Image: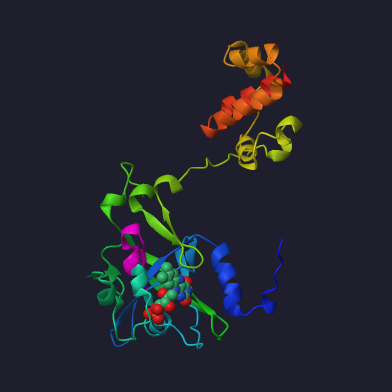
Amino acid sequence: MNTIDPATLQPHEFYRLLNSAVAPRPIAFVSTVSADGHVNLAPYSFFNVFGFNPPILVFSPSRNRHGHKKHSLLNVEEVPEVVVNVVSHAMVEQTSLASSEYDRHVSEFTKAGFTEAASERVRPPRVAESPVAFECVVRQLVPVGDGPGAGTLVVCEVILAHVHGEILSEKGTVDPHRIDLVGRLGGDWYVRASHDALFEVARPQLGIGIDQLPAHVRTSAILTGNELGKLGSVPALPQPEEVKAYRESGALGELLDEARYGCQYLPDLLHAHAKKLLAENNVQEAWLTLLSSERA
Ligand SMILES: Cc1cc2nc3c(=O)[nH]c(=O)nc-3n(C[C@H](O)[C@H](O)[C@H](O)COP(=O)(O)O)c2cc1C
């Protein structure tokens, strides 16, 4: 393990570690406007949602290498309103282009080729191409230092959301494949949050916990930490009579024969079988399988 004290590095060196390890980060594509009406658009991955009653988004423009404030921050100091547009894969190259350090009076909508759509309740326009855009009022600015790299938290309350219809599922919720978001990692890396990158983890209903797993399961050489996590997420173990019924149902027939007539060790065979069931998210049957070895 390498242990690093940020005080021993230059800020930009520690920034590389922070940016690579705290990742992937969502991207806020932020439109703002200056008091004299110049529109600005810039991406910020120091960004997230921090509450939903009221709905709060926070992004953070860092001071540039000269310690100067970015245009987005100068603008919100003058006009405390923003639109946070999300970034889909179809937008990522143009979004990157919009991060160029154009002069303050130059609109990144024009330079990066995005379409301005008038907002309803705030002055900055939204990005028409973005699948979801949040009109926000800025509630607070929290400066954290004033040297190069110092952030200012821009605390925004969402007052209106715009959602493209084609990203909604039949149930009316945002479909992660259709919204096709991108995230930012360290260096020049991005991630596309769709296709094979997506997977589901069922929410536990007060899971029994890893500490409650039988010792042969907890210390299994076959099951991984993720698999133990799935097993520990159930609210209760199957009852002995359920396990008995499962054993007698013949579901494990071939496995039991293999163990009886071959040289395989039954718990290992059952752990390997449970592993396959867990890969299919069949946690209940995985448990019946694992307990079949105990109650043999
Ligand atoms: C995907 C992406 C994410 C970025 N995230 C941040 C960020 O969180 N904070 C920041 O200060 N700059 C970030 N940048 C750089 C700014 O977008 C860049 O400095 C831009 O010129 C700022 O524009 P402005 O001065 O018009 O506000 C990011 C750039 C990209 C491409």
Q: With respect to residue 287, does 225 lie above or below?
A: below
Residue at 47% from the left image edge and 87% from the top image edge: 68
Residue at 50% from the left image edge and 82% from the top image edge: 63
> Is 218 placed left or right of 206 in the picture?
right
Residue 105, quarter of the rendered image: bottom left
Q: Which of 83/4 is in front?
A: 4
Q: With respect to residue 288, does 20 lie above or below?
A: below
Residue 127: where, in percent of width, then height?
29, 67
Q: Which quarter shows the N terminus?
A: bottom right
> Is 79 placed left or right of 166 in the picture?
right
Residue 151: where, in percent of width, then height?
53, 78
Please identify the residue farthest to the front as the structure is shown: 263
**In the image, which residues are magenta?**
82-94
Number of numbered labels in the structure image: 0
Q: Is residue 182 visible?
A: yes
Residue at 37% from the left image edge and 73% from the top image edge: 82
Q: With respect to residue 284, does 58 lie above or below?
A: below
